[in-house]
């Protein structure tokens, strides 16, 4: 083979080798470039998604703020209306303040009136108590309990000072006390008088001679009240139209029946005198000296 041809072939081979090397390098560059583009694309997609999420969040915030603004406007309008109404009522309120002051003054006058009435009531109760007890001896006061509540007089008499033992008949010892009470009742002739019998819870002894025809404590209490009423009428001249006799048996105790002392307190006769209001002032005029 000629040297020229050999050289030409060698040259061709070198060119092919160089071309092959160049293609590999370009391919590698292309791959790197493609990888970079792919990475950039992925970053762009993620950035776009984040931007879209941010836009959505901002839109939601904007919607909330718009709703809050709407509510604030409504609240402002409501407050404005209330303010306008208050301003419109201001003049009327100024007038009402004057009326309110007048009402307060009237209330104060009523309160002073109530205090005055209470004071008079206490004075009247004291007068009644003094009128009822001034003629009773110390010994009688031990067995007679006198209370005045709201103008009503309650005179409680122990059964052992009024009646014979185990009986509803009035004993001789009660005569003097009943005469004094009858005098008081007679003095206040327009008052109503209730005689109320009470017993303890011990059943009556129906076999006793003094309890003949008495069935129970109802009968005993009623008969004892009736005995006092008849004594006031027949012996001391109290108008029977003013008198009422009633029995409450064992059902109105003032204390427990668990002790002998309690039973003794529950065995009592109560004289209840109810004065009329228009006679209260007369009591003051008749009050004994030193009652105030």
Image: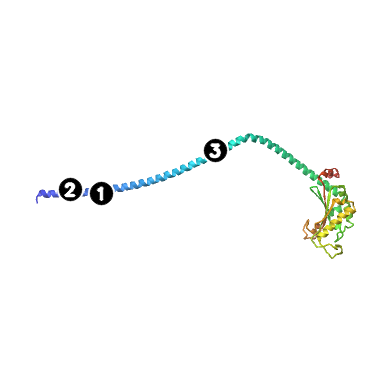
Would you place residue 288 above or below residue 165 in this image? above
- Contact, mark 3 vs mark 1 (Cβ under 8 Å): no
Question: Which of the pair 117/87 is nearer the observer?
Answer: 87
What percent of the width, then of the height, locates residue 21? 21, 49
Task: Decide: is 133 above or below 201.
Answer: above
User: Which residue is drawn at the image coordinates 44% and 43% (left, top)?
Assistant: 59
Q: Secondary structure at mark 1?
A: helix
- Residue 147, position as x, y percentages in the image: 81, 50
2 or 1: tag closer to the N-terminus: 2
In this rendering, would 89 be left or right of 278? left
Q: CA distance from mark 3 to mark 2?
A: 90 Å
Q: Mark 3 vs mark 1: give the one in front.
A: 3
Visible in this render: residue 55? Answer: yes
174 sits to left or right of 96: right
Residue at horizontal 79%, vertical 43%?
Answer: 120
Side of 126 relative to 57 (left or right): right
Identify the residue at the far left of this view: 2
For label 3, the crowd category at 10 Å Cα-Cα, with few meaning under 14, some 14 to 19 and many 20 or more, is few
Return the residue at label 3.
Answer: 77
The location of residue 228, given as percent across then percent down, is: 86, 55
| Residue 136 at least partly seen | no
- Which residue in the rendered view is the most extreme toward the front? 241
Residue under circle 2? 15
Q: Nearer the viewer, mark 3 or mark 2?
A: 3
Q: Earlier in the sequence, mark 3 or mark 2?
A: 2
**Residue closest to the far top:** 91
Q: Tell me the CA gap for discs 2 and 1.
A: 18 Å
Q: CA distance from mark 3 to mark 1?
A: 73 Å
Residue 27's disc is: 1
């Amino acid at each position: 083979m000629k040297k020229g041809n050999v050289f030409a072939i060698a040259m061709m081979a070198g060119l092919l080798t160089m071309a092959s090397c160049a293609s590999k390098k370009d391919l590698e560059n292309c791959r790197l470039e493609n990888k970079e583009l792919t990475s950039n694309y992925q970053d762009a997609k993620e950035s776009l998604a984040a931007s879209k999420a941010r836009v959505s969040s901002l839109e939601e915030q904007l919607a909330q703020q718009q709703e809050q603004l709407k509510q604030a406007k409504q609240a402002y309008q409501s407050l404005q209306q209330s303010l306008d109404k208050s301003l419109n009522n201001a003049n009327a309120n100024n007038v009402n303040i004057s009326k309110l002051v007048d009402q307060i003054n009237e209330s104060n006058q009523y309160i002073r009136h109530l205090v005055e009435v209470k004071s008079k009531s206490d004075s009247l109760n004291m007068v009644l108590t003094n009128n009822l007890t001034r003629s009773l001896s110390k010994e009688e006061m031990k067995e007679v309990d006198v209370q005045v509540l709201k103008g009503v007089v309650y005179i409680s008499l122990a059964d052992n000072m009024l009646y014979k033992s185990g009986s509803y008949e009035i004993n001789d010892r009660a005569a003097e006390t009943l005469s004094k009470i009858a005098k008081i009742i007679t003095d206040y002739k327009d008052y109503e008088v209730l005689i109320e019998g009470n017993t303890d819870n011990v059943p009556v002894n129906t076999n006793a001679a003094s309890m003949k025809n008495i069935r129970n404590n109802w009968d005993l209490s009623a008969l004892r009240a009736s005995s006092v009423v008849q004594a006031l009428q027949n012996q001391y001249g109290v108008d029977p139209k003013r008198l009422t006799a009633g029995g409450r048996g064992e059902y109105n105790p003032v204390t427990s029946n668990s002790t002998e002392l309690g039973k003794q307190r529950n065995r009592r006769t109560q004289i209840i005198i109810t004065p009329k209001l228009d006679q209260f002032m007369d009591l003051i005029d008749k009050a004994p000296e030193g009652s105030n």
